[in-house]
Amino acid sequence: GKTASLRASVTSRIVPKAKSGAQISPQASYKVAVLGAAGGIGQPLGLLIKMSPLVSELRLYDIANVKGVAADLSHCNTPSQVMDFTGPTELANCLKGVDVVVIPAGVPRKPGMTRDDLFNINAGIVKSLIEAVADNCPEALIHIISNPVNSTVPIAAEILKQKGVYNPKKLFGVSTLDVVRANTFVAQKKNLSLIDVDVPVVGGHAGITILPLLSKTNPSVTFTDEETEQLTKRIQNAGTEVVEAKAGAGSATLSMAYAAARFVESSLRALAGDPDVYECTYVQSELTELPFFASRVKLGKDGVESIISSDLEGVTEYETKALEALKAELNASIEKGIEFAHKQQ
Ligand code: NAI
């Protein structure tokens, strides 16, 4: 009826429409868990996922304050049932049978901090949550938001390996916000309609490891060297722009929730059989010599269906240099994550 189409149109604003106009099963319904659901990202992310017509159960987990968030969201008259789980004793029940686990648990940056400064606290949080994921829903798609993503994803991979359940096609670092920001800034600069602009962002999710491939912007746009330099820097520092504006109250939460909801919706559409779903994400990859790398991937029923290598072909000299320059930092972050996971064994 009318409300169903309103709901569908609201959600379809989050995810760009499938270009093929492909239909997905009208019965598609999935269970999604958010770990860290009472936080700055978790709350608006819960709201956006509650709006999805593809979700039947929304399971909210946090170490505190999640009951009120769940009670509040449960009054929205959208199809999904909202359930709350508080503390480690309820984590297993939260995870059993879920299709997608989204992890925004952990501390955010304050002014002057890099994402790597969060490592000591967030590495342990991600480790313990991934252990529970491995034990209770090893088949689920895992979306990691907790920073530093460049390290927390390799940590998760090692923990899943230790538990014997690692599937590289189902472990994702959420770098969607970098794409969302790149799309916004390029559209503003070039006076383009926002909905049409798509910039692939590759590498990782911190500082210079964030590499927007402006030369691969769709629709095709040309930039002066100055514009390229300025836009690249702005996209790389956009998170810090928000951290400074919030002046101690945290980092991006609303735009992050928007980006994470888009990535969840894309994943669910892919699970439901849409054959035309592409997103940039930080995954195990053979695109470069680094074991993890963010790039566009095609999503399918089993997670990553293929990694799109063509984006790295025929890039500009500026982009080639930036790609070489980011490898040392990204590699160090990956190794730091792996080392942490091994030390904890
Ligand atoms: P927040 O502090 O507002 O919320 C974090 C939530 O995690 C809190 O509710 C807290 O109780 C919960 N939490 C802490 N330990 C937990 C545990 N062991 N199990 C379950 N929940 C736990 O922080 P915010 O702003 O929501 O940010 C969360 C994370 O997301 C940070 O690490 C931040 O750096 C990262 N982030 C990532 C971005 C990306 O693009 N990937 C962008 C913005 C933030």
Image: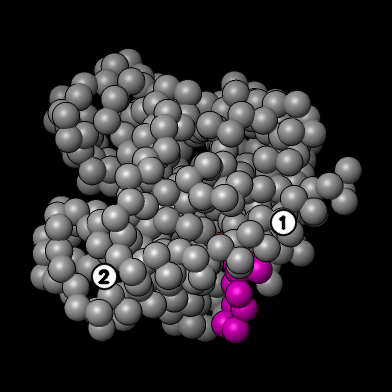
Is residue 36 left or right of 182 when viewed as pictured? right
Q: Residue at x 20, y 24 (%)?
A: 22
Which residue is identified by label 2? 185
Q: Residue at x 25, y 83 (%)?
A: 226
Nearer the camera: disc 1 or disc 2: 1
Secondary structure under the numbered disc 1 in the rendered image: helix
Q: What amino acid does circle 2 point to? A: Phe
Is 49 located above or below residue 249 in the figure?
above
The residue closer to the viewer here, 268 or 205, is 205
Q: Quadrant of residue 29?
A: top left
Task: Quote the CA–CA distance across marks 1 and 2.
Answer: 32 Å
Q: Quadrant of residue 320?
A: bottom left
Secondary structure under the numbered disc 2 in the rendered image: helix
Q: Residue at x 76, y 64 (%)?
A: 120
Q: What amino acid does circle 1 point to? A: Glu
Q: Determine which of the numbered discs, if any, sits on residue 116 in the image.
A: none
Which residue is identified by label 1? 335
Q: Residue at x 57, y 82 (%)?
A: 111
